[in-house]
Image (cartoon, rainbow, N blue to C red):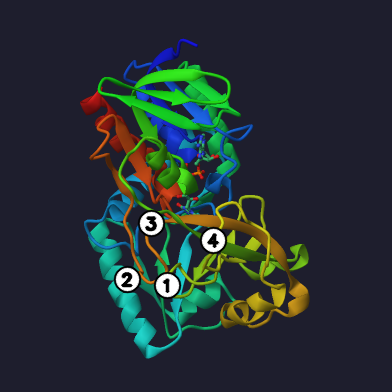
Amino acid sequence: MEPSEIEVAVIGGGVIGLSAARAIAASGRSVCVLEREHRPGMGTSTHNSQVIHAGLYYPAGSLKAQHCVEGAAALYAFCDTYQVPVRRIGKLVVAYSAGDAERLDAIRARGVANGATRLTMVDTAFVRAREPHVRPPVAAMFSPDTGILEAEALVRTLAQLCRDQEVAVLAGTPLVACEVLPESITLVTPAERIRARVVVNAAGLYADDVSALAGGDPFTIYPCRGEYAELIPSRRGLVQGLVYPLPHTHGLGVHITKTMAGAVTFGPTAAYQDRKDDYEQNRLPVEAFLEPARELLPAITLDDLRPGGTGIRPKIHPASESFGDFLIRRDSRVPRLIHAAGIESPGLTACLSIARELAALVAETC
Ligand SMILES: Cc1cc2nc3c(=O)[nH]c(=O)nc-3n(C[C@H](O)[C@H](O)[C@H](O)COP(=O)(O)OP(=O)(O)OC[C@H]3O[C@@H](n4cnc5c(N)ncnc54)[C@H](O)[C@@H]3O)c2cc1C
């Protein structure tokens, strides 16, 4: 079977792959997206907290810091332009000990250095007025430019914009093998073969497998599950916005978020696991959320909680390490392969900014 020809093939139809495809097609190149599920965005892109982060926590100079801050600005503008539901709801970060108050000062300084806007240390009166049911903290910071959006709508809009630019979004099309030549990479799927000049690896949890299929650089994606509990609807009025404790090793700590649909969630937890597709086995009992939730909202009882969703972080580092940056670069062994791997949080926030970088790498490679 003769392969069909395309200039650029993107593996993965999540927010990273779709944003990248759109940015690459804008320069007039022919682009396709291979997505193995029957529709785009069924992976991590729709299993997350749906928060537009401001860029507080990431080391200065990291890709996470850079793309979070640039991506947040781009994403707010995008949502306004294309009517993706979004709200600048604001986030409180609360400290409950003198030690945590010092850490909070450091987080603010880091956020400011990263370019996060309008971060303000606030007093208990501010916290009480805004969140009367939150346990009064020793110190608190307010980030008015942290927001929420509807991730499903973002995926739908990106996919439609891709199609409008004649990107072939091939759902139900898994990449199963690659044939690498100096001038091209032929992608093998169960139904067809596609010869591309450049391939972008945006396969999320499976980015390491895709690199291996192409004989590219070896790296490992470690799945790390995050679980949520929700407040029952009649208690949603206890919380107005986003409330976070100080971050811990593998995540931001069990925090309170709101969704555009009005749900109030606690989570996500963080637990490394073996499988990349296991969202449900051995779920934490809802009781496990009560203590961390009451740290922030003392009024709630077990009856106020019910199980929520789960997501799986595509970590680029093992549990023994605490930080790994996004891996966005051309492969050293297969120069026609470009990776966007280890795109855990703030990847949703950062998707449009990461897409710009990927489009620039493609332009250099084509
Ligand atoms: C619990 C949790 C909470 C989070 N909260 C936030 C948040 O509040 N704010 C934020 O900014 N970020 C958040 N994130 C991070 C954010 O969700 C991700 O960074 C982002 O969704 C990554 O998108 P992606 O396109 O890289 O991955 P995905 O959405 O997983 O897309 C990858 C796609 O590749 C496809 N694929 C894989 N292998 C193949 C193959 N062989 N052939 C074809 N297709 C393939 C998959 O089916 C999938 O659709 C959170 C993540 C988690 C897990």
Mark 1 vs mark 2, foreground winner is 1
CA gap between label 4 and label 3 equals: 14 Å
For the residue carrying disc 3, how many other residues have a C-alpha within 10 Å: few (<14), some (14-19), or many (20+)?
A: many
Residue shown at 39% from the left, 51% from the top: 342
* Image side of residue 207 versus residue 285, left or right: left
- Frontmost residue, 113 versus 203: 203
Q: Is residue 34 above or below residue 154?
A: above
CA gap between label 2 and label 3 equals: 23 Å
Which disc number belongs to residue 316?
3
| Dot 1 amino acid type | Pro
- Residue under label 1: 247
Residue 190 placement: quadrant: top right
For the residue carrying disc 4, how many other residues have a C-alpha within 10 Å: few (<14), some (14-19), or many (20+)?
A: few
- Residue under label 2: 107
| Dot 2 amino acid type | Ile
Residue shown at 62% from the left, 81% from the top: 294
